[in-house]
Image: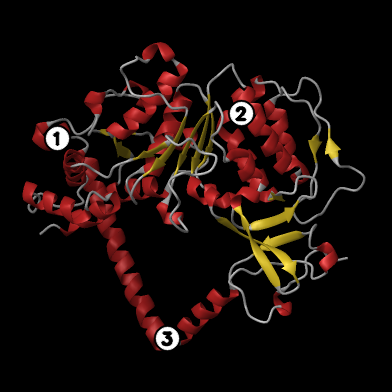
Amino acid sequence: MLRLISRAAALSKPRDDTVLASASPLLLNHQLFYATKSKGNKKQEDNKKSKFKPSDSAAALQSDSAASADDSESAKARARRLADDDRDPSLDVGPNNRPLFTKATSLSLLTRKDASTYFKFSEKELNAVLPEGLPTGMLTEFKESMRHALLVRQSFLDLRDNFRRVVDPPLSSSNGPKVRKQIVLDGPRSCGKSITLAMLVHWAREEGWLVLYVPRGREWTHGEYFYKNPQTGLWDTPLQAENVLKDFVKYNESHLRELPCQILDPILLGEGAGVGLMKGVDSKEIPEGSTLYDLVQMGIKQTHASVSVVVRLRKELSLVKDIPVLIAIDQYNNWFTFSEYEEPVTIRSTRPVHARELAMVNAFRSMMHDDMMVGAFSHSTAVGKLRKDLPDVPADARINLPRYSLDEAATVCHYYLRQRLVSREVFSEDNWKKVYYLSNGNGEELRSLVPLMR
């Protein structure tokens, strides 16, 4: 019998989220679904496209091509000038004639004196240390500035030193700030939460830590196959689980090969992505002497086991004592709202599935433990304002990151001057302060307004 039957024909009105499911009430509690894009949005896009005449489209395409060519030539010319500028160290000057770039060679060597300076990254090393992917804001900053460098902010140094004191308690003092093992990074839009989290992961991996980094937490609650596991009562997303395991092993393989599995209970098998249950097999044994690398490979090679492996991995990470372990989740706010998925209740009705009902989110969301964990909110993926006291999160875990201060904005504007985003003829203290106050310290807006100085 076919497992995937469209419910769209059975509904009297089109839905924004189409759920492919069996129409039989007998199968409502155990079946595989697939999340797809909205048909309604596609119709709206088709209607918008139909309003344009062919002649208008051709003219617009020609105009866009010409503008794109001009922008490309301008970018190439700017890149050539920046290459010439690199031979002149006298240009690397920030506000009040302070050095624009720090001389520190790693994030571990940064001190408070390096705050409000820029740290240069190697593109090759950056992609190697963060193979899961870089935050959108970081990629945009690199592209617009034409340099792999980021501002060293005091907020990052404080976060780094907090976790450094967790691992090395003698560095802490009774008069210092409270040490937190669980932190939620909050703050206004474009204040640098995702970039700060990525820099923390970079630093931790430089230190030799085992880090599970999830740069796109929203993907755990949106898209692909999903089904309700009758053994757990939670919803499994095998393709997302497989991707999480593949990302986790990219940088951490050497650590995982050395860490033995401490839980040898069999791994429960669920439905594979689009292939259903395995006949006559409901679990898989973990041989004695297996490592965490063997466990992860089991979930990668067999999607029937991928979700259970991710859930087991969470328990195994809590038992690792040989090296520090950090769990870093970006877009963490998406784990406290409803997911994209819907559960059929009757032939003509569904109910939204909350993120806490997803097996992987349920395993990783809680901060009520003794492990090091940091989550960052992402307002670009927000679906609503969250309450202050979040479930499964300590009351004092939330830290608000500020937008750029006046001193930080001064360095940022001088850096953009150095990177030729604005000409020296129009750059002045009055002008960059106007930009700062107009943007209210919003990094994205500040970067877009600097070239408009007149």
Residue shown at the point (75%, 49%) measured from the top left = 233
* Vertical position of residue 3 compared to residue 93: above or below: below
Residue that badge 1 annotates = 93
Mark 3 Cα within 10 Å, few/some/many (few <14, many 20+)? few
The kind of residue tagged 2 is Glu
Residue that badge 3 annotates = 52
The percent coordinates of residue 308 (x first, y second) are 73, 40
Q: Earlier in the sequence, mark 2 or mark 3?
A: 3
Residue shown at the point (25%, 58%) measured from the top left = 74
The kind of residue tagged 1 is Val
Residue 331 seen from this side = no
The percent coordinates of residue 172 (x first, y second) are 37, 15
The image quadrant of residue 302 is top right
Left or right: 30 with respect to 241? Answer: right
Extreme-top residue of the structure:
170
Left or right: 64 with respect to 417? Answer: right
CA separation in Å, label 1 and label 2:
41 Å
The percent coordinates of residue 102 (x first, y second) are 24, 28
Residue that badge 2 annotates = 253
Q: Secondary structure at mark 1?
A: loop
Q: Secondary structure at mark 2?
A: helix
The kind of residue tagged 3 is Phe
Mark 2 Cα within 10 Å, few/some/many (few <14, many 20+)? some
**Is residue 77 or residue 449 the one in the foreground?**
449
Residue shown at the point (51%, 24%) measured from the top left = 209
Image quarter (top left, top right, bottom left or bottom right) of the N terminus: bottom right
Q: Which mark is residue 165?
A: none
The percent coordinates of residue 90 (x first, y second) are 13, 33
